[in-house]
Every structure is written in structure tokens, then in C-alpha cells.
Amino acid sequence: MNNNQSSCKQKIIERVHIKPKWKLKNYGLRSSPGFVYQQPSVLIGRTDVASVTSWLAPIVWEGTFDATLIDFIYKKQNLTIATTVFALGKYTRFLKDFLESAEQHYFVGFRVHYYLFTDQPEAVPEVKMGENHILTIRKVPSLNRWQDISMGRMDILEKLIENELAGEADYIFCLDVDTKFYGRWSVESLGRLVGVIHPWFFEAPRHLFTYERRPESLAYISEGEGDYYFTGAAFGGSLEDVLHLTKTCREQMNIDAANSIEAVWHEESHLNKYFLYNKPSKLLSPEYLWRNINAGASQIKTIRFSHVAKNNADVRPNP
């Protein structure tokens, strides 16, 4: 074999890419004979809110699903839900409420693996985990800007999914720590790609959305575009879809940084750009991310998950 042939063969070998072996999922929504539940209706339901998007993705509100039925169906699928949360600096003060309330309301009766990223493992409180719920603590470096903490999550999430979760979990949710659960959050939230509608903008027209409006940024969305405004505090889906989301957002933020621009709402701006052109397969209503400082709204029949009131200047490392 001459040198040219040897060189060519070596190049082919270098291109080999082994894809992650994703854990197999049973997508069939199978029930069983004799299981009794309330008869569904095509005529009676929520009339005060939209329960489906224009691309036919469901929007989950109280009154749009039967918890007894869907719990029965999904328990047959033997699912594991990975859940990530970041607590750096003074944000460790929110961990106790987050974890204790999650253990009361979050995927109760299903397998959950929490991955907690913190620069202070010693500050993590002891919280009794429910059956089949596991907490893994990972130490990460401290950062001086809350913006860097926020944007750096996408890189960590990408590596976690790609390197560890392929054979371990079926779905993943990425949640903010300065939050608390007040009601059920369970399998009604599962989907291929899941976004949560921001509580400040669910009644607003698109021109009021705080998208990135500077064309210089890869998070740019023009005035005439937009579906919903999604929060960066909660999103999720299948491992494959969330991996693609995090990788895309991370790459676009790196390009922006190289061009000396930072999107107005950091990774949330890039998340909204991604969701505009990669439509979520399921949307969660603001029940799944309210804010304790918000006034009530007639459409919100129950608050499942909420940001807690806090003094940003007190907990953030920089303005």
C-alpha cells in the first residue's frame, strides 16, 4: 500500500462518530381492560384559554387532562426523568424549599434523578428523597457574573446529556432553583420538546415580547415574528431534542460572544429563537411557572410551580 492510500484510510477512520445509544422508550399510550375513569368529552372543557397551538401542540392547563388516567398509562412505561438544577453562590439558600416541595409534588410515583450543580456542595441541605428519587451533587466553579452562570448552563447540560444520560433517562427537565412547587407536576408535562409559557407575557401581543431585537445577535427575532414568549427557567423534553436545543443555543451564544454581543435575556433569548423555528411538541401553561410577585389571573386555576419573591441585588453576584 502506498503512502497516499494509507493517508486516505486514516482520514476515514478519524471521521467515525459513535452516536449515543438512547434509552428505548415505549411511545404507545396503552391502557387496560377494566380500568375505570371519567368519560372524556369533545364538547365540554376549558373555554377561557387555548388548549392547542396553531401547529396542533397541546397547551397543558388544569382541566385539560385526567391525572388518574395518564398516571396509569405512563406507569406502564417504566420512565426515568432526569432533572437539573443549578445553585451557585447565594442561590443555595433556595435549595431546601425547592427540594422539599419537589418531593411533595414533582413526578411523585415515578423515577426521578436530580442533578444538582453547585459551587458549594457543603451547603446542600439534607432532604429525604422519596421512593425511586435520587439526588446527585456535582461541583462546578464559581462565577462572578450571574449572566455567565445563566448562559453557562447550556454547555453543562449538553455535556451531561451526551456523556451520561443516554442510557439512564428517558426525559429531562431543566429548572431554576429560586422556585417552589405548590401542586402537581407530573407526566402530563412529558413531550418530545417542551416549553413553558412565561407568566408575564401569556396575555401579551407579540410586539411586547422581550425578544432580542438587535440583528447583530443570533438570538434576533424581528417585530413581526413570534409565537409565545417562553421562560428560560423551565424547559425539557426527550434527551435527543434537549441535546439539540442546548447545543444550538451554546453554539449561538459562543458566536455572539466572539462578536462582542450578549443577548438581552441571555440564554432565554436564544431559547426563544430556538423555539420559534423548532416548534415545541407540548407547551405548559403559566401554571407551571408562576411568580409570587404576580397578581392573580382568572385563567390560572392552580399554581403548580412558581418563582419565589427575592431581592435580586442580594443574591446575584453582580448587577
Image (cartoon, rainbow, N blue to C red):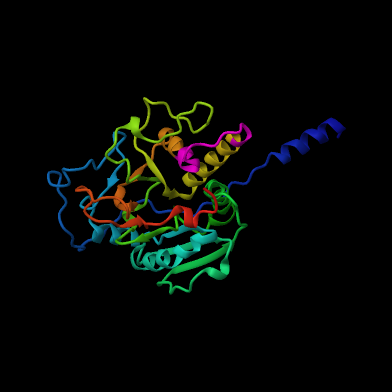
Left/right placement of residue 134 relative to residue 48 reads right
> How many circles with numbers are drawn on the protein?
0
Q: Position of residue 260 (x, y in %)?
A: 61, 33
Q: Residue furthest left?
A: 43
Residue 76 seen anywhere in this rendered image of the structure: no
Q: Is residue 158 magenta?
A: no
Q: Position of residue 276 (x, y in %)?
A: 41, 34
Q: Position of residue 26 (x, y in %)?
A: 39, 54
Residue located at (72% from left, 37% from top): 12
Is residue 213 shown above or below 79? above
Residue located at (53% from left, 66% from top): 136
Left/right placement of residue 43 relative to residue 208 reads left
Q: Is residue 264 magenta?
A: yes
Residue located at (18% from left, 60% from top): 37
Left/right placement of residue 300 relative to residue 310 reads left
Residue located at (36% from left, 62% from top): 106
Q: Which residues are magenta?
A: 257-271
Residue 127 seen anywhere in this rendered image of the structure: yes
Corner quadrant of residue 81? bottom left
Classify the position of the N terminus by image quarter: top right
Left/right placement of residue 6 relative to residue 287 reads right
Q: Position of residue 266 (x, y in %)?
A: 50, 41
